[in-house]
Amino acid sequence: MRLAELSGRSGVPTATIKYYLREGLLPPGERVTATQAEYGEEHVRRLGLVRALIQVGRVPVATAKEVLHAIEDASLPHDARLGIAVESLPPPRGSAVDPEVLEAAGGRVAELRNALGWDHATTSVGQEMLVTAVATLMQLGYPCSAEHLMPYARLAGELAAHDMDLVEGFETPTTQLEAAVALTVLYEPVLLGLRRMAHAEEATRRYGKGVGTRS
Amino acid sequence: MRLAELSGRSGVPTATIKYYLREGLLPPGERVTATQAEYGEEHVRRLGLVRALIQVGRVPVATAKEVLHAIEDASLPHDARLGIAVESLPPPRGSAVDPEVLEAAGGRVAELRNALGWDHATTSVGQEMLVTAVATLMQLGYPCSAEHLMPYARLAGELAAHDMDLVEGFETPTTQLEAAVALTVLYEPVLLGLRRMAHAEEATRRYGKGVGTRS
C-alpha cells in the first residue's frame, strides 16, 4: 500500500508518518519509484506500537527508539530483548517523598518480595513505582504494610499471567515483543478503569443505590 | 498542637498549610490567642487526604474542595457522599481517539457489563476511562474483545472488594469516605507497580533469567 492508504488504515496523518520514518521509528517502505514507496502490514502494526508508546505511554521519542531497536535486535536473546524493551517504559507518574520514608518503603517492598518469593528484577521501573507509592501511603498515614499489600500482589501475579498468555497469542518473537510493550502501557488504563467501575458496583452492593449515578 | 508541629507531623510546609486553610481545604483550628490556633489529629489526617488529592491525584484545587465538601455534607446519605466524592476524581490520563471507534468501544464495554451483571454506575469516570482505553486498543489493532477483558474485570472485582474492606477498617463515616477517596488514588500506582514487577517475575519463570536485570 502507498503512504495515503497507510495513513487511512492506521489513522495516523501522513505528516506524522513521515516524521516517524525520518526518526527511524518506522522502517522504510520498499521503494517503487523515485518518490513513492510501498508499505505492508508490518508498517500498520508498527505504527500502532509507536502511537501506543508516544501518545498513550507519553514515552519520549528517543526512548521509543531504544525500545524499538531492542525489539529488533536479533543478536540478543528473547528474554533480554523483552527486559530492555519493557524496562525502558517510564513509570506513569511520580510524587515527591522524603528520602527516609523512601528507604523505609524500600524495606517494606523487600519484605513483600520475600513473602511472595519474587526474587528477580531487583531494580526495575515497577519496583520504583511501588516503592514511591508505598512511601506516599506511609507519609500520609494510610495502610500499606506488607500484609495489606499481599492480596494486591497476588492479583497482580494473576494479571501478569493473563498478560503473558495474551502476548503469547502473537505469532513471531518480534510481534510478541511489540505486544508485550504495547499491552504493558495500553492495559494500564483498562485496569484502572475497571477497578473504578468495580468500586461503584461493590459500593452499591454494600451500601445501596445512588453511588456513581449522581442524579 | 500548633501550626509548626502540624507542619512537622504532616511534612507539609507551613506556607502550604496556610494556603489550604485560606482555600477551605482544611478546617480552621481552635483559636487560642489572637494570632495562634490549636490543631488536632483530624487536621493531620485531612492534610494527608488533601496531599493525596492534589499531589498524587493531580486534582484541581476547586475539585478537591468539592470532594471534601461532599465528604462532610451530613445532609446526604453515606452512599451519595461516597458517589460524589469518588466520581469527582479525574481519570489519570487521556488519549485522542476517533469518535466512531469510541462508539464501538462503548458498545463493547456495555457487552462486558452485561456479561458481568454490573448494572450500576452507567455513567462514571471509570467507565469513561475504560471506553477510551478500549477504543485505543481497537484503533491500534490489539486484542480487547469482551472475552479478553473478562479476566481483568473479574480481578478488578476482587480488588474492589479488598479496597472496600480496607476502607471499612476506618472508624467513622467521615474517615471511611476520606479513605475511599485517598485509596482510590493512592493504590493506582501500587497496582501498576505490582503488575510491572509481576510481569518481570512471570517472564523470568517462562523464558529464563535476564529479564529486568539488564546487566
Image (cartoon, coloured by chain):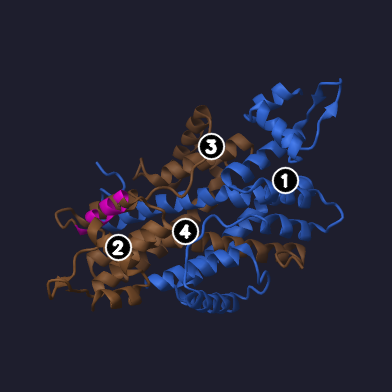
Chain colours: A blue, B brown
Q: Closer to the camera: disc 4 or disc 3?
A: 4
Viewer-closest of A130 and B148? A130
Q: Secondary structure at mark 1?
A: loop
Mark 3 is surrounded, within 10 Å at the Cα level, by few (under 14), some (14 to 19) or many (20 or more) other residues, namely many
Residue at (87, 55) in percent of width and height: A75
Q: Secondary structure at mark 4?
A: helix
Q: Closer to the camera: disc 2 or disc 1?
A: 2
- Report the residue marked by disc 3: B135
Tell me the amino acid under the disc marked 1.
Answer: Phe
Rounded to the nearest angstrom, the CA distance separating label 2 from label 3 is 32 Å
Q: Are marks 1 and 4 on the same chain?
A: no
- What kind of secondary structure does the magenta stretch mostly adopt? helix
In the rendered structure, which disc, 4 or 3, sits on the residue that comes first in sequence? 3
Q: Is residue A14 above or below residue A78?
A: above
- Report the residue marked by disc 4: B188
Percent of width and height locating residue A48? 66, 38
Q: Chain of mark 2?
A: B
Q: Secondary structure at mark 2?
A: helix
Q: Chain of mark 1?
A: A
Question: Is residue B55 at all visible to an observer of this figure?
Answer: yes
Tell me the amino acid under the disc marked 4.
Answer: Glu
Q: Which residues are magenta?
A: B62-72
